[in-house]
Image: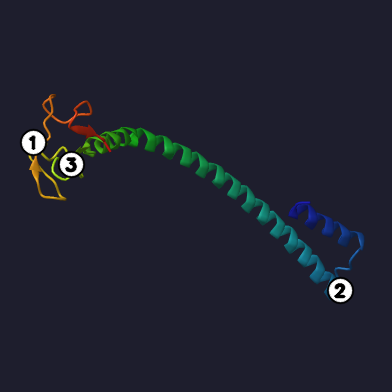
Amino acid sequence: MTVNEKAAYIKGLAEGLKLDENTAEGKILTKMLDLLSDIADEIKDIRDDAKDLRDYVEELDDDLEDVENDLYADEDEDEDDDYEEDQASFYETTCPACGETVCFDDSIDPEELTCPNCGEKFSCECECDGVCEDCSGCDDTNE
């Protein structure tokens, strides 16, 4: 039962009892039943308004999502491209003096490497005019 149905049921019970509205108790009960009906009507109106607002907010949310997708779709793709461009390629080679692995990136000239372990200066010469995964002296780890 809804609140309105319950209020109507109680009011029907009171009318069936044939309350005397001339007595103090009868007046109070009659006014309370009227108040109960008014409150039930207000609750129904508030629920209807809340449902309308909820539907409207959902529509706004969907519209906002469409606008965000239109506005930021290109930006998201640009960020992915920028991230990939910012990622440097890392390479590994072995120090000829001590045998330790030396890692370096694109910012270091492969022909002027210094081993951080023993301090030996050496070069990583590649036939392909740079460092690549096909060279015998260097391994492209591209991490």
Query: Which residue has dot 2 on it?
Result: 23
Q: Residue at x 77, y 66 (%)?
A: 31
Classify 10 Å Cα crowding around label 1: few (below 14), some (14-19), many (20 and above): some
Classify 10 Å Cα crowding around label 3: few (below 14), some (14-19), many (20 and above): some
Vertical comparison of 28 with 62: above or below: below
Query: Which residue has dot 3 on it?
Result: 104
Query: Which residue has dot 1 on it?
Result: 111
Q: CA distance from mark 1 to mark 3?
A: 11 Å
Quadrant of res 128: top left
78 vs 73, nearest the viewer: 78
Q: Check if mark 1's residue and mark 2's residue have beta carbons within 8 Å.
A: no
Classify 10 Å Cα crowding around label 2: few (below 14), some (14-19), many (20 and above): few
> How many labels sit on residues?
3
| Disc 1 residue type (three-letter) | Glu
Q: CA distance from mark 1 to mark 2?
A: 110 Å
Q: Is residue 137 left or right of residue 63?
A: left
Element on which disc 1 rests: loop
Marks 1 and 2: which is nearer the front? 1
Q: CA distance from mark 3 to mark 2?
A: 99 Å
70 vs 44, nearest the viewer: 70
